[in-house]
Amino acid sequence: MSSWQNWSGTESATGIETLRPGSADELAAAVKSAAEQGKKLKAVGAGHSFTGCSVPQEVMIRLDRLSSITHADQQSGRVTVGAGTGLRKLNLGLAAFDLALANLGDIDKQTISGAISTGTHGTGARLGGLATQVVGLDLITADGSVLHCSAEENPGVFAAARISVGALGVISSLTLQCVPAFLLRAQEMPMPLADVLDGFDELADGNDHFEFYWFPHTELALTKRNNRVGADVEAAPVGRIRGWVDDELLSNKVFELTNRLAVRQPAMVPRINRIASRALSAREYVDASYKVFCTERNVVFRESEYAVPREHVIEVIRRLRDWIDTSGSRIPFPIEVRVAAPDDIWLSTAHGRETAYVAIHQYHQLPHDPYFQAFERIVADYDGRPHWGKLHTLGASELRARYPRFDDFVAVRDRLDPQRVFENAYTRQVFG
């Protein structure tokens, strides 16, 4: 028997039976055996979700032995990978084939199946999240059978299983539509928050990938623009010393220290944030796409993120700023804003609408409930959809009203897992 805890320390489990199948056949046999014994089973990835979506109740399946590229076609860009493949390993493997994912989130600690299943996304007004890059998957269902899913084969299950929060079965492999490897020019610079909000649509539509970070209690935001470069442009990465200072010293070690200071002296947070925002300096570099997308984040925090219709995001930010200003709360972590194109995946936070994401964070040693609850009250006015892997309090009734295909998903779940082998407390909360 073993124990498990997620990265942020918000969820844990003890007395868990752990299985590590080495093949899809072993995985199918393990799932079938657990189901026949009436046991609850969960596949666990890197544990990077803040919610209880992957908390095992009785049997935990680790997929780290299914963690390699099994097929790659450079001509078509189709790549098949084991479900337990970590994103960092995947990015390096794709680069060896001169391929890349068209869009990524900002960390690479997750497994590909965990990232897909919780709706992980990056930013880009013309691009979708990771799940939109999946063109096929193999799903092990509760009876141990393997469903091959794509737009042509089991299309209803495919529409549900690309973002399923682990509630339909265990994914054993995924086929991804990749693109030729490409370079991005990264331009990072501080701007007045008022200018960012006033020009948000132009910034979002005028760049391949745009996001900004606003430090509460200040009037400054850090903007990030990432754009593809022409074939004649060569890589010009951040220098080793500058990269260490910006990404390791300032973003991790110093940021950890300032958050610890915020715990002891909350009244200093506005001053700390003002100093931090003024210390931000512009930089520009060109590097492989996955190196630009993904950054190292070691400071432990709590996070809530909601997707809102893009046309309402500026109103959400202004209301959130008003609440922070009047509540007396002290927030040392920046607020992150990103965008995505609409898609047709049933439980995608961007399903059927142009989407903006607002992510709020709080240091793990500071209280977060009042802040996160106020945020939820604000986004509820705009049919906000919570990221499946980040903290929220919504249940099935609220989610049903915000997802047009919610009942279609539940019907697929009823058919594939009538005995609720893949159930846990979180799936009971969000699916009923």
Image (cartoon, rainbow, N blue to C red):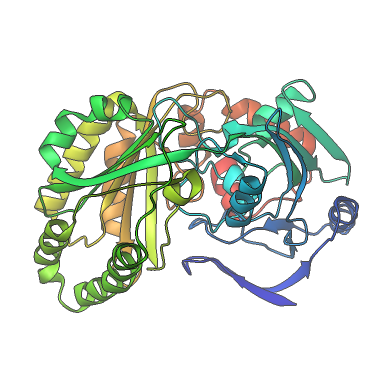
Q: Nearer the viewer, residue 192 or 271?
A: 192
Residue visible at 22% across and 39% down?
317
- Left or right of 302 on screen, residue 418: right
Q: Nearer the viewer, residue 229 or 35?
A: 229
Q: Nearer the viewer, residue 12 or 377?
A: 12
Q: Position of residue 33 (x, y in %)?
A: 90, 57
Q: Quadrant of residue 41?
A: bottom right
Residue visible at 60% across and 61% down?
46
Q: Quadrant of the C terminus?
A: top right
Q: Position of residue 331 (x, y in %)?
A: 21, 60
- Left or right of 228 on screen, residue 325: left
Q: Quadrant of residue 4?
A: bottom right
- Regarding residue 302, the answer to whether it shows in the image is yes
- Left or right of 268 on screen, residue 181: right
Residue visible at 40% across and 32% down?
124
User: How many numbered discs?
Assistant: 0
